[in-house]
Image (cartoon, rainbow, N blue to C red):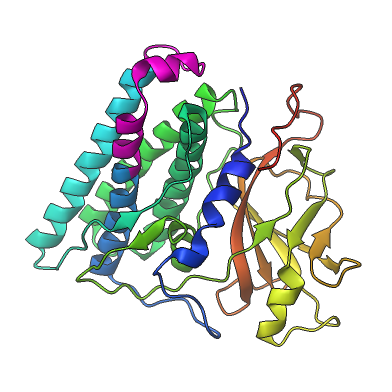
Amino acid sequence: MHFSLTLAASLALSAVQASPIVKRVGPVTTPKVNDGIILNYALTLEYLERKFYQDGLANYSQAEFVAAGFEDPFYTNLKEIYEDEKTHVSFLDTALKTANITPTVELKYTFPATDPLSFVTLSSVLEGVGVSAYLGAAAFIMEKDYLTAAASILSVEARHTSYIRASLGESPFPDPFDTPLGFNQVFSLAGAFITGGSSPVTLPFMAFPPLALQCTQYYYEADRSSVTFSGAFTAAQKFSVDKNTPIYAVFFSGLDKLPVQVRITAGNKDYKIDRLPAGIAGQVYVVLSKSSTAFNDENIIAGPAILEVYPKGMIPSEPHPKCH
């Protein structure tokens, strides 16, 4: 059962232009954070996940999930995931109020799911991003009690991810390590789903310009597949990039950050790499960077995009889902 996880991520990120999250308009640095900011950052993500599952359970019945191939007790487990997200929201909201810090609120969201299969596929993407968000934030948490609580939530989100991936026929643990992401990287991904609303809290994060993957009829295979970034060279010129500027596609997989220099395609609009790095697998993130060694916010010019990558020689036997 494969509705491409890469397609699901691409559909979600295509909505980023509608997001009210602040877009990058020039060079930025890694934001300064404290525990209150991190708790509100986590609460922002948990509100998004809570609403996603609330909508999915309202839009699709148990019978519809079974008809889509998700046999019992999948629907019951999905409701349990929803309850987990509700609990996470309540816990973080209470923690902030107890510390006399104003908590953020639920915003307005849109999710490009049209049936149970696309909903579950998007769930896998969201849960993976949630794991990467908590993992990336962990190093910045100062209060030990908050760090313990964040780790406790992280482990549950990781179990959600594994369960959903297995239900889709994907490897539940494709890499020995999960992938940490920075605050602005995660906020760039979250921005694809936030379409409105107002929060009493202003977080110090900015979204990078989106990075679009050209749809392909093939699965992404490590150390083999090519990747085309649609319109990326045209967009990069806003950042004083020209045809002579070396740009790198940097792939985040587990604890690895692997740069591959891109080339400009014949139409002078896209960037392309001819071969994915070896050793990457699962939900992989990619950004475009001006540097092949320093992958900080100052050097990122677009992304992240999300790819589902299979180990070399291990792509699914069934045909790849069609582009939409």
Q: Nearer the viewer, residue 103 or 231?
A: 231
Residue 185 is at least partly visible in this image: no
Q: Is residue 140 magenta?
A: no
In screen coordinates, is 174 left or right of 218? left
Image x and y of residue 44, in percent: 30, 58
Q: Nearer the viewer, residue 289 or 266?
A: 266
Q: Locate the N terminus and report the quarter of the image it occupies.
A: top right
Where, by quadrant of the figure, is residue 155 drawn? top left
Q: Is residue 287 above or below residue 319?
A: below
- Looking at the image, the residue that sits furthest to the right is 266
For the stretch drawn in magenta, the main secondary structure is helix
Q: Is residue 166 above or below residue 274?
A: above
Residue visible at 33% across and 73% down in the picture? 33
Image x and y of residue 67, in percent: 48, 14
Image x and y of residue 123, in percent: 45, 38
Residue visible at 51% across and 42% down in the picture? 125
In screen coordinates, is 220 left or right of 55? right
Q: Nearer the viewer, residue 192 or 112?
A: 112
> What range is drawn magenta here?
52-73
Residue visible at 21% across and 60% down in the picture? 105
